[in-house]
Image (tube, rainbow, N blue to C red):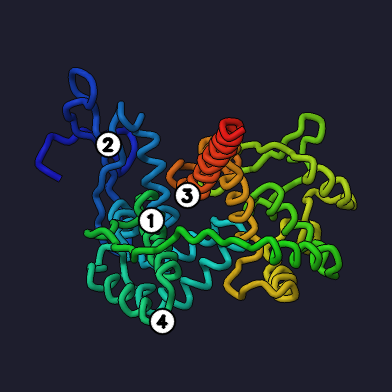
Amino acid sequence: MSKQERFKTNYPGVFYVEGRAIGRMGTEKIYYIRYRREGKLIEEKAGRQFVDDMTPARAAGIRAQRVEGKQKSNTQQRDKVKSKITIDDLAIEYFAQRDNGKSAYTDSLRYKKYLKSQFGPKEPKDLVKLDTDRLRINLLKKRSPQTVKHVLALLKRLVNFGVDRGICKGTSFKITMPLVDNIKTEDLTSGQLQDLLEVIETTPYQTAAKMMKLALFTGMRRGEMFKLKWSDIDLHRGFVHIREPKGGKSQKIPLNSNTRQLVEKISRDDVEYVFPGRGGGPRISISRDVRAIRDEAGLPKDFRPLHGLRHLYATMLASSGKVDMFTLQKLLTHKSPSMTLRYAHHRDEAMQRAAEEVGNILSDAMQVKEKKNVV
């Protein structure tokens, strides 16, 4: 510390200097403590009179704690803050604070498989753009762009997790994501849909069958059905409450007659969730069973049973010509209207059919007129 007049207190090893007060006029006392640890004399600041509400007695208490080794010195505390925080450290803390759902489990597998060995020992601030560019390029040789995007997005979340908590510095560059064609809208022919519905009625995988029906009747996402509780279904007012849909706030969708009949047939069995997992808690997977139903119905292997039926729900509404894009956005609980625009061409087709219908009406009218003129 700089040379300033020191004033003794009634407490051994505690003194103060006078300095300009922070946030007010005049001066204030700045208390310091002196003590020895492992034979080394340590002199450090205990706190300011007004800012830290420091008194000689409090300063003496801090000194006693540090003499006894119960409290680290200022230098040791600063060193702890500055200590190396690796991406492995961030991952451990990040996953400890996540729920135990399927997405967290999948992310943990992604981390172990694609990030841990190469990025785990490094600090975020030591990463260079070449590191993530190489990861992206190499993964794209053997994985889909969507998978690569998930991996890089996880790395970005881990870094942001540490930065937001002030325990590390971030990267000096922006992580480049691969371009993903995410506008696939799965569809089924009327014959394929009929085959699927027949299998759904007879399959032994009835929980999966009911979830597939619910996806077709409401357009709900798989995760939303996993989290669906009986308390979310309002039979009296005719709504289903969607708790924290993907990327947005909780919403509600209408309870149509098909959905009402479906949920009324599901046994509650004194459990909280409509489709409970083991032990009555939330379900985390149904993939095997829905794939078995898909395969028995003879549907294409790339048809995603639950997500595909959500798309089919949206396609049917859009192609009916009776539902506008804003209403469809609300029914699908899309955060942004741009996400709903992938179905706009189905509405265009409906309008074209309507326009053709007008032409047919006019043609019929013209033919009637011509017959009258001939007579």
Q: Earlier in the sequence, mark 2 or mark 3?
A: 2
Mark 1 vs mark 4: which is more N-terminal?
4
Residue at 17% x, 27% y is 20
Which numbered dot is residue 31? Answer: 2
Q: Earlier in the sequence, mark 1 or mark 2?
A: 2
Camera-side residue of 64 and 80:
80
- Between the C-alphas of marks 4 and 2, the distance is 63 Å
Q: Are marks 2 and 3 in contact (CB under 8 Å)?
A: no
User: Which element type, helix, strand or loop, lies under badge 3?
Assistant: helix
Q: Which mark is residue 322?
A: none
Q: Is residue 367 visible?
A: yes
Q: Is residue 313 left or right of residue 166?
A: right
**In this view, the mark in front (4 or 3):** 3
Q: Which residue in the protein does label 1 denote?
A: 162
The type of residue carrying mark 2 is Tyr
User: How far separated are the C-alphas under marks 3 and 1?
Assistant: 43 Å
Image mark for residue 345: 3
* Mark 4 vs mark 3, CA separation in Å: 33 Å
Q: Quadrant of residue 169?
A: bottom left
Q: Which mark is residue 142?
A: 4
Residue 248 visible (yes or no): no
Q: Residue furthest left?
A: 3
- Looking at the rendering, in which quadrant would you find the N terminus? top left
Label 4 SS: loop
Amino acid type, callout 3: His
The mark that comes first in sequence, 4 or 2, is 2
Q: For the residue carrying disc 2, how many other residues have a C-alpha within 10 Å: few (<14), some (14-19), or many (20+)? A: many
Q: Amino acid at mark 4?
A: Lys
x, y percentage for residue 295?
A: 70, 75
Q: Disc 2 or disc 3, which is closer to the eye?
A: 3
Q: Left or right: where does residue 253 sit relative to residue 183?
A: right
